[in-house]
Structure formats: C-alpha cells, structure tokens
Image (cartoon, rainbow, N blue to C red):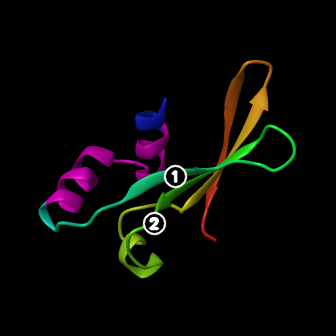
C-alpha cells in the first residue's frame, strides 16, 4: 500500500514523474505521522527538499488516512 500511496501524490502520469525525479536526483520520501490519540494518520510526501522543488511533480504533500475497521481509507491530497 505504501507504494500506491506514494504514487498517488504524483497524480496522473506518475511513471514519467518518477523517471524525471530520478534523472534530476531529487529524493522524495513518504513518512507517516502517527496520532497521539485516535487511529487516523497523515502521510507526508517529499520531506527532503523545499515545497517549491516538489510542486512540479506532486499534487500535494499531505494525505489523511482514516482508520476504517482494519484498514485505512485514503483521503484527499493537499499542500500544507
């Protein structure tokens, strides 16, 4: 599921964007922010460079993942 979430941040034509990221030696990681209370988490994409660098590749840098009885439901991707 992590690879699927990672690719969701890239939106349409994610394969081309992945290739360009690699060619330009731009590292973008996926981190998860765990809650102090509750079960929902936040996926954070990018994390290695400024938001300005990533805006050409991604549709956002955050995704809410809502706990739903044994699995997570992906929420909207947004910039923070």
> How far apart are the two marked residues, 1 and 2, measured between alpha carbons?
8 Å
Q: Say if 7 sits above or below 4 in the image.
A: below
Task: Count residues near mark 1 (Cα–Cα under 10 Å), then give few for <14, some for 14-19, many for 20+.
Answer: some
Compared to residue 66, the image places residue 71 above or below, namely above
Residue 51 placement (x, y as % from top left): 46, 76
Sequence order check, earlier mark of 1 and 2 = 1
Q: Is residue 7 magenta?
A: yes
Comparing 25 with 9, the one in front is 25
Q: Quadrant of residue 41?
A: top right
Q: Which mark is residue 16?
A: none
Task: Residue 46: say if magenta.
Answer: no
Q: Which residues are magenta?
A: 5-22
Q: Which residue is mark 2?
A: 47
Pick the residue in front: 15 or 1: 1
* Element type where label 2 sits in the image: loop
Q: Position of residue 23 (x, y in %)?
A: 12, 62
Left or right: where does residue 30 sit relative to residue 43? left
Would you say 28 lies left or right of 45 here?
A: left
Looking at the picture, how far across and down is residue 7, in whole percent? 40, 43
34 relative position to 7: left or right: right
Image point 40% across, 36% down: which residue? Answer: 3
The answer to whether the residues at label 1 and label 2 have Cβ atoms under 8 Å apart is yes
| Residue farthest front in this picture | 36
Q: Is residue 59 left or right of residue 32?
A: left
Category of crowding for the residue at label 2, using alpha-carbon neighbours closer than 10 angstroms: few (below 14), some (14–19), many (at least 20): some
Q: Which residue is mark 1?
A: 31
Most extreme residue toward the left is 23
């Amino acid at each position: 599921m992590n690879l699927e979430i990672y690719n969701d941040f890239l939106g349409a034509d994610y394969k081309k964007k992945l290739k360009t990221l690699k060619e330009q030696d731009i590292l973008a990681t996926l981190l998860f922010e765990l809650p102090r209370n509750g079960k929902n988490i936040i996926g954070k994409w990018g994390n290695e460079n400024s938001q300005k660098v990533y805006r050409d590749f991604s549709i956002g840098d955050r995704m809410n993942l809502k706990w739903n009885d044994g699995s997570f439901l992906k929420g909207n991707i947004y910039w923070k």
